[in-house]
Image (cartoon, rainbow, N blue to C red):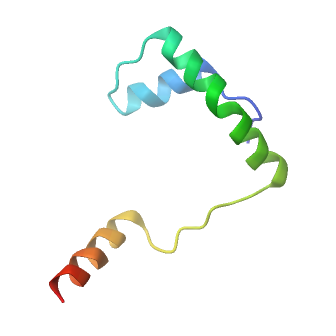
């Protein structure tokens, strides 16, 4: 995992999500998230998901019906 998030990487992810993002906004976002990404990379942390996201929705709907 890279220790620095680039503005280009943010622009690519935003485009994939169909979100228009100004160049200065992408740079600002990259600057804001880089310290957190660096800490996760340094500690080699992972955040496990107990359920896959769509399964989570199904489980939540079942709980509402009870």
> Is 24 left or right of 1, judged from the image as shown?
left
Quarter of the rendering occupied by the C terminus: bottom left
Q: Which of the 4 image quadrants contains residue 65?
A: bottom left
Seen at 39% across and 31% down, the residue is 16
Q: Residue 12: x, y in percent?
A: 49, 25
Q: 6 or 28: which is nearer to us?
A: 28
Seen at 77% across and 39% down, the residue is 38
> Is 7 left or right of 23, judged from the image as shown?
right
> Is 8 left or right of 1, judged from the image as shown?
left
Q: 60 or 55: which is nearer to us?
A: 60
Q: Residue 45: x, y in percent?
A: 74, 58
Seen at 36% across and 33% down, the residue is 17
Q: Residue 27: x, y in percent?
A: 58, 16
Q: Residue 37: x, y in percent?
A: 70, 40
> Is 15 left or right of 33, judged from the image as shown?
left
Q: Residue furthest left?
A: 65
Q: 66 or 56: which is nearer to us?
A: 66
Quarter of the rendering occupied by the N terminus: top right
Seen at 20% across and 80% down, the residue is 64
Q: Residue furthest bottom?
A: 66
- How many discs mark residues in the rendered view? 0
């Amino acid at each position: 995992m890279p220790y620095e998030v680039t503005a280009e990487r943010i622009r690519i992810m935003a485009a994939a999500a169909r979100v228009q993002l100004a160049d200065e906004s992408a740079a600002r976002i990259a600057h804001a998230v880089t310290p957190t990404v660096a800490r996760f990379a340094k500690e080699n942390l992972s955040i496990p998901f107990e359920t896959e996201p769509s399964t989570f929705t199904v489980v939540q709907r079942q709980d509402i019906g009870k």
